[in-house]
Amino acid sequence: MQAYTIGQAARLLGVSPDTARRWADAGRVATHRDESGRRLIDGKDLAAFSVELAKGDSGEEDASYTSVRNAFPGIVTAIKLGDVAAQVEIQAGPHRLVSLLTREAVEELGLEVGMEATARVKSTNVHIDRV
C-alpha cells in the first residue's frame, strides 16, 4: 500500500507541513514510522482523512449554498478589466485559477486584488492523472 510522508500529505491536502504535523500529533490522522524513523500516513488513511476534511464545517454562518462541489478558497492576485469582459486570478494554496467573466460581475462582487474569494469549478469533464 502507498504511504505518504507528512510533507507529501501536506502538499496533497493543500496545507503546510506544520499543519499536517499538528493534525497527526492530535491524532486526527493515523501515522506510523518507517525503518528510518520518518512518519508516514497510509494512503487509505490519508484518503479517508481528506474526505472528512472536505466535509468539515467551514464555521461560516453566511456560507453560500451551491451545487458546485469543487471550491477553491484563496486570494485574488490579479484582475484584468476589459470593456465587457474581465479576467480574475485566484491563488488557492498551490493552485492558480483563472476565470473569465463579465466586467459587470467583477464590479458587482466588488473584487479587488488582495481580497479573499472562492473559485468554484463545475465541469462535465474531469481528468485525473496518476503521479
Image (cartoon, rainbow, N blue to C red):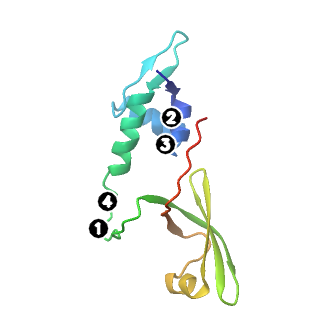
Whether the residues at callouts 1 and 4 have beta carbons within 8 Å, the answer is: yes
Quarter assignment of residue 100? bottom right
- Dot 4 falls on a residue whose secondary structure is loop
Label number found at residue 13: 3
Residue at left offset 29%, top offset 67%? 61
Say whether disc 2 or disc 4 marks the residue closer to the N-terminus.
2
- Dot 2 falls on a residue whose secondary structure is helix
Numbered disc in front, either 2 or 1: 2
Label number found at residue 103: none
Say whether disc 4 or disc 3 marks the residue closer to the N-terminus.
3
Disc 2/disc 3 C-alpha distance (Å): 6 Å
Whether the residues at callouts 2 and 3 have beta carbons within 8 Å, the answer is: yes
Say whether disc 2 or disc 1 marks the residue closer to the N-terminus.
2
Please provide percent x and percent y for residue 26: 34, 32
User: Which residue is farthest top?
Assistant: 35
Near-viewer residue (127 or 56)? 127
Q: Which residue is mark 2?
A: 9
- Dot 1 falls on a residue whose secondary structure is loop
Residue 45 lies, with reference to residue 16, above or below; the image says above
Q: Which residue is mark 4?
A: 59
Residue at left offset 51%, top offset 68%? 117
Q: Amino acid at mark 2?
A: Ala
Q: Amino acid at mark 3?
A: Leu
